[in-house]
Structures are given as structure tokens and as C-alpha cells.
Amino acid sequence: MAVDEKESWLQMGESCCNTGEFHKMRACGQQVLDLAEDDPDGMAMIAESSLYLAAGGDEESLEIAKEYIDKLQEKAPDNLRGMLAMAEMYWSEFQIDKALSAFKKFLRKVEKANDDKFKGIFERGLSFYADVCVLAGEAEEASRAAFRASEMADTLDKKAVFYSKGLFLSNYRVMVADKRLRLHQDFNQLIGVQMTFPHKVEKRSAKHSLRIGYISPDFRQHAASYFFAPFFKYANRTDFKLYAYHTGKSDVVTKAFKKIVENWRDMEGKTPQQIARKIFDDKIDILVDLSGHSQNSCLSVMAYKPAPVQISAIGYINTTGVEAIDYFLSDEVCLPATDNGRFFSEATLRLPHCHLCYAPELMRDTKMNIQDAPFKKNGYITFGSFNNFLKVTEDVLLCWRNILEKVPNSKLVIKAKICSVPSGREIVLKRCRQVAIDISRVELRPYSPDYLQQYNDIDISLDTWPYTGGTTVCDSIYMGVPVIARLGRTHGSRYSATILVAAGLKDFVAVNDMDYVAKAVQLAINKELLNLLHHDLPSAVRQSRLMNGKAYMEDLEEAYRGIWAKYCRQGE
């Protein structure tokens, strides 16, 4: 077989993989086999491409993938491409423990090979490995893998995507603040924007309304969208003209947003430069990014500086590090006035009350949920956590153990995606055993559509840190279930605190681990208060600042006027 010809087909297959043309990728693998029957690289390429096709709904492709992976195990178990295919197969079947082991074995071997021709599969393996680590609750390992994938990527765009993912995942664990800031600022080098749009400082007449643009991939069924409706539903249309730039896929929630936004721009599939040009042509005065370093980020659009004043808000809990973004939206709880924002590349734009407003009306039915606390019928207290298990650190688990020990006969419900598969359940139970939690008192629940209704089984919700709950905290108190939270030192670790303060529940915000345990135990003991909260919270939360869209927008729009006036003064 001609080596050069084989390598050409493999390179073409890699190119097809990058563009999502998996049928063509499989055809390239077959061409390799036509050159030499049972060539392990050809078999591996067919196996891997078939796994991707199976993920898209092609059931026959899954059998093809398994057939070739079995052949590889028999004939060439140490083939790098075959090892990657095997790891990906475990991942596709959500055998998390086997996937972790297989990916680690593959990554060690490919790194040892130190051959540039394997950079593509190395990058791919790291990307998948990061995803497996996310589901397994291994935040630091996931973040490292994403950063390493960024190093392996062959284009600035891909480097930026992986690096951004690494930044997002870094928030799940404690990190030295100045190191985190430097990591975020380094993102600028990967954006690849060679020019920005020009803006002339000019004052606007009193009759001229400011043009406010909101950009996000998540004007859809997404956790962040629970906080987006007030921007449009309660806006002052006299003084402000509103625009929404949706860069993601659409669904039924997107249709609901379209009905309340007069200037809707569907930007799915457009390049960052095309989106930025549209924003610039719309003459937006203040552009608000609602994605930050979350998935399908819009930061590459913001980097073009399509609006003269730009803000990062809600979608991300930390500084973006992007030079083109002027302000970061926060409040007096998340970033008190005593904090000078020295670990943010943006200036801090503080609201006097909570910097977000919980508004689930566009997302689901808002019927009141009033009933007795579950302990009334169970005879014991049920604590619960519905947060992403990636947020659950060892310190959190230790506090949960202490709470269970101090509240006799109490139970703990952990509801998360990781609990949806047997291997994931075992990972959760193993981590509980490691801190000596009595697993006979732990109930694991999988992801389910009736997520909200399952709060009816919980007496007290327990929040996580340093990455606290956001939507889960709101959902819990909205359903009448009080939340015990812990106050951190950073904006992101105070999210749940600002939500509870806005809801009138500041007494449930602990200042340290001991206080967290004490507050949970005290509330569990005070059963009269606990039951009263289950009856009163649904109504109280709906009437609180947390859900007062009109008051929230008045604060936000005053802030907009302030930063616009400051911008205009630059021309004096």
C-alpha cells in the first residue's frame, strides 16, 4: 500500500470530521481499507464516523461501529484511532467510568507518541474527555482538558471555543482571583479580530431614544432565559428602542420572545463579523451580551465593538476578560461598593437591588403551588439538591453529611443528570461514601420533565458553592421550598445570596460552612416555621423584588442612562 495515499485519505477523513460530513468521513475510511484489508486506521475511521452518524439517529451505524471496534480490539488493540473510537463508544453509551478510563489511556498514549499527525485526534479526544469529566463531576480535570484542547486546535476559532469552555469550567472550583483574571484576559489573543467598528461620540437630544441591543444564543428553552423576559416585557418604550439578536437555534420559547420584541434579528448561522455588522448598521447605542463564556458564546461578536458601549450581563458569572466590553452587570450583594472590581477587566455596573429578575412566565405555567411541607406526611425531614452535580465539591458533601448527622432520620435527595445512568449513580454514591455519608439516607433521582413538581417532595433545598445555584434557587423558593445558601467572596459565589436577599430570605444566607450547617439544622428543627414557609413562599416570592420586573427595569434603565451620559462626556 502507498503510505502517502493512505495518509491522504486519513487527512481527508479528518477534514470531513471537522466539517461534520460523517458519511464522507466513513467513505474515506473505506478507501483506506480498499488499499489494505483490515488496516486498523481505516477500521477506526469507519468506527468513529459511524458513532457520530448513530448519534444523529442512524441506528444501523451503531452496529457498524461496534463491529469495527470489536475487530480492532482483536487485531490492533493499541491503535490510537481505535482506542479513541473505543472511548467514544463508551461515552455514547454513557458508561462514564469506562469512558473515563479509556480516554485517559488514549490521551497518555497519544501524548507519548508526540507526532503532529495525531494532533487532530488528540484534540478530539481531549474535547470528549472534558465532556465526560463534566458529567462525572470532575470540574478541574474537565477545565484542564478544555485548555489542552485549545492548545492542540489548528485554528484560532477552535482555540477560542475550547479556551472559553475551559474558562467556564474553571468557575466550578476555587481559584486564586488574580490567576483567574489573567486566564480570562489571555482570551483576547484568541479572538482574532483585526479591526473594530468606529464610533463617534455624540450627545443625543432629549427626544432621541437610546437603542439597546441584547445578544444571546439562548432566547430559547434554557436556564438563562428565565431572566431575559423583563428586558422586553417591562421596558420603557418611550426612552428606549429595543433589539434582540438571537444567534442560536429556535424553539417554542423563541416564538414567545419574538412576540414581545419589536426588532427581532435571527442571526443563527451568521459569522461573528456579519452579526457585528448588522448591530453596527442598526446603530445600537448599548449592546448587552447575555452569554459570556457559556456555550455558543457571542464574545467573538462583542470583540468587533459593534456598539459604542458594551455590557456583559447575567449569562456568565465572572469577568469575560474581553477588552471590547466596557461594563459587567452586578449588584450590591454580589459585588458590594467596598469591592473595587479589581479582578474584572470591565468596570462594574452595580444595581441597587438584585442584578437579575426571575420571570418564568414565557417558559412555563405559573400556577401557585401551596401545600404542607413533606415532613408532615413523611415524618422526617427531606433535604434536596437539584443542582448540576459538577457544582458539588467535597466541602459541600462534608456539610451535607454534618447536616444529616444532626437531623435524625433525615434524608437527602440528589437530583441531577449524572443520576440518569447506572455508572453515574455509582460515581455519586462513591463520592458520598468518601466523606462517610450514610448512603442508605441518600436518594438519587435522574433528570426528568417533571423537575419542578419534584420540589413537592423536598422540605429544605441545600445550595452549592463556590458555583452557586441560580435558576435552581429561584425554582425552589418559587415552589415554596426554602434554600440554605452560603455567601462566597466572588460575584459568582454570591449569586444565590443576591437571589435570596431579593426574595426577602436573607436569613437563609450563611457566612461560612459552620453557619450553613447550623441554619439548615435550625430550620429543620423549627417545623412550624418550615411548614409556614411552604405555604407562604410561593406568594411572597411572586411579590418580592426578585420578580418585580417593572422595578428591575427602572433600575437597569437608569443605569443605562448613567453610562450613556458618561460615554457622551468623553466628547466634551
Image (cartoon, grey):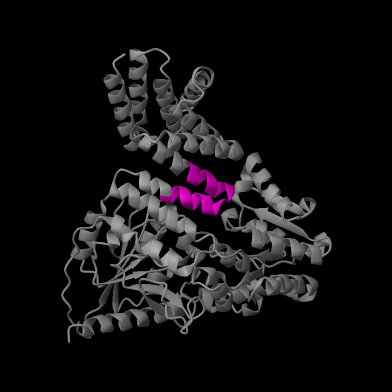
Residue 250 showing in the rendered view: no
Residue 237 coordinates in the image, percent (x, y): 32, 76
For the C terminus, the quadrant is bottom left
Looking at the rendering, which quadrant does residue 246 occupy? bottom left
Q: Where does the image place residue 260, in percent across and percent down from the top left?
A: 37, 65
The residue lying toward the viewer, choosing from 243 and 507, is: 507
**276 or 555: nearer the eye?**
276
> Which residue is painted at 42% across and 51% down in the image?
147
Q: Is residue 566 left or right of residue 350?
A: left
The answer to whether residue 204 is above or below residue 542 is below
- Report the magenta residues as a range: 129-147
Q: Nearer the viewer, residue 453 or 285?
A: 285
**In front of the other: 457 or 381:** 381
Please state the horizontal and vertical placement of residue 308, each as a whole percent of the image.
Answer: 23, 72
Q: Is residue 338 visible?
A: yes
State the image quarter where residue 116 is shown: top left
Quadrant where the N terminus lies?
Answer: top left
Residue 133 falls within the magenta-colored stretch: yes
> Overall secondary structure of the magenta stretch?
helix
Q: Is residue 549 above or below residue 414?
A: below
Q: Position of residue 553 (x, y in %)?
A: 41, 77
In this rendering, the count of numbered labels is 0
| Relative side of 366 to 335, left or right | right
Q: Residue at x 29, y 54 (%)?
A: 267
